[in-house]
Image (cartoon, rainbow, N blue to C red):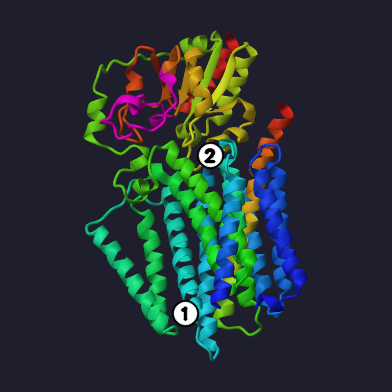
Amino acid sequence: MAEGLIAGLVVFTLASFVGFEVINKVPPTLHTPLMSGSNAISGIAVLGAILISGKGNVTVTSILGTIAIALATINVVAGFLVTDRMLQMFKKKEVKA
Amino acid sequence: MSDFLPSSIQLGYLVAASLFIVGLKQLGSPATARQGNVLAAIGMFIAIAGTLLEKQVVSYELITVGIIIGSILGTIMAKTVAMTDMPQMVGLLNGFGGAASALVAVGEFWRYLSIPQSPTPDATITILLGVLIGGITFTGSLVAFAKLQELLPGAPISFPLQQPFNALLAIALLVGSGYMLFHPEDVPVFLALVAISNILGIMFVLPIGGGDMPVVVSLLNSYSGIAASVAGFILMNNMLIIAGALVGASGIILTQIMCKAMNRSISSVLFGAFGGGGGGVTAAGVAGGAIDKTVHSINIEESAMMLGYARSVVIIPGYGMAVAQAQHAVRELADGLEKMGVDVKYAIHPVAGRMPGHMNVLLAEANVPYPQLYDMDDINPQFDETDVALVIGANDVVNPAARHDKASPIYGMPILDVDKAKHTIVIKRGMSAGFSGVDNELFYKDKTMMLFGSAKDVVAKLVAEVKQL
C-alpha cells in the first residue's frame, strides 16, 4: 500500500507541475471561464463516486456514493455548460472584430 | 489493484488526462478557448465511460439515478444563471465537488466497516485527508456562496474567542486523527472528525470580507481539485489524482494573481482582520482623505458634450455598473461615441467584479468586443493621453490614495491611474462613502466631475444625449 501511495504522489506532483505550466499566463479576459472550466474538471470526483456506489448491494457506502454522483455530476454538467455559454459570448465578438 | 484492470480502461484514462491538459491549455487563449472546453468535456465523458466499465462496478441502478439527477439540475443551473451571479455559481459548484470527494472518503470508510479487514494506516490517513479537505471545501464554499448571494452579510464575521475556538478545533482534529490511526474503525470518533472538518470550513470563510471573495473563490477552486486528488489516493485511481492536481494548480495560480492585484499576501486575506468589502473602515482612511472637500458636479448635457468631442475616452466599469445591469447601456454609449470618431477603450482592474475576470464576462455578455478591453498594466501608461476617463460604479480601484497615502487601508493596492487623464467623470449615486467606507480623494480633484444618479439611468440618458450631438 505504501508503494501505491508513493506512486500516487509522483503522479500528483508531476501533474501539478504540468498544471502550473499549462495555465500560467492566461489573459484576465479568460480567468472566469478558466475557473469554471477547471471547476468542471474537479467534478472528476464522480469517478470515485461511481467506483464506490456500483458494487452491487445497497449499503451505506453505495447510498453515500449515489449522493456524491449526483453532486459531482451537477458540478461537471453545469461547469462545462456554463463555460461554453460564456465562451460563446466571447466567440461572437471575434467574428465581429 | 490497478494491475488487474483491463489496460483499455487505463488507456482511456490516459486519453482523458491528455484531453484535460490540452483543453486547459486551449482555455488560455481567446481563439481556442471554446474548443478547449469541449475537449475537456470529451475527456470527462471518456473518463466516466471508462469507469463504468470497471470490473468492480456491477450495478448501474444507483449510478443512473445519480447521473440523471445531477445532469438535470446541472443543466438547469447552467442555463438559468445570470452572468452577474457567476461567482456564486462557481462557489456553489466548488462546494458540490468538495462534498462529492468527502462523501467518497466517508463511503470508503463505511466499506471497511462491512469487510473483515481494517484499513491500513495509509488508507486511514488518505480517508481522513479526504474528509478534511472535502469537508472544508464543501462548507467553506457554502459560506462563500451565502456571502456572495447576500444571504450572509459581506462584512467579516467575528465573535469573541474565535482564535482560541479555531485552535481548539485544530487540536481536536489532530488528536482525533492520531487516535484513528490506532483505532481505525471507531465510528463516533470518525463522525466527530467529519463534523470538525465541516466546522473548520465555515470558520475559515466567515471572517473573510466580501471584497476578498475573488481570492476565496479561487482558493476554494484549488481545494476542490485537491480534494478530488485525495479521493484518487483513497481509491488508487490515477485519473482522479491527475485531474485533481490540474485543477489544484490552476486554482493556486488564480489565487496568486488575485492576491497580487490587491497587494495582499494570501495569509493576510485568510487571517487578517482587515477585509470589509475591499476597503475596511478605519479612521485613518477617512482622515487621509480629509483635504479639500469641494466636489465639482456636472450634468448630463455637459458630460455628453465632453465625451462626444473627446478624442479618446477610457471607460472604467466597476461592480456597481454590473449590479445596476448597466453594461448594455454602457456598450450603447461606447457605440455612439465611436460613431462620432471617439477612440473608446475599457480599463479593467483585475479585481473588478467578484471573481477573477468577472467584469470581462459581463462586458462580453453586452457584446463589447474583447480587443477593446485593456488590463491595468496596458492601460495605465495611456491615461496621460486620455481626454476623458469615465468611471462607472468603481471606487477603490481608482482611489489615488492607494499610491501615496500610507495611512489608507488600501495603500499599496495597484490602481487604475484615472486621475492622470485630462478629465475624469465619475458616475455615482451620491457622495456617501458607500461600499468600502474609504473616502476617495479622486472625487475632490479639480479635474474630476461627479455625475450623480444611478448608473443605468445616467448612462441611458447619456446615450440619448450623445445621439443628438
Q: What element carries label 2?
A: helix
**Residue type, numbered disc 2:** His
- The residues bearing labels 2 and 1 have C-alpha atoms spaced at a distance of 44 Å
For mark 2, name the chain: B
Name the residue carrying label 1: B121
Query: Considering the image in quadrants, where does the N terminus of chain B appear?
Result: bottom right
Q: Is residue B389 left or right of residue B311?
A: left
Q: Quadrant of residue B408?
A: top left
Q: Is residue B405 magenta?
A: yes
Callout 1: chain: B
Corner quadrant of residue A58: bottom right
What residue is shown with label 2? B358
Q: What stretch is highlighted in magenta?
A: B394-419
> Which element type, helix, strand or loop, lies under badge 1?
helix
Front one among A2 and B458: A2
Q: Position of residue A23 (x, y in %)?
A: 59, 46
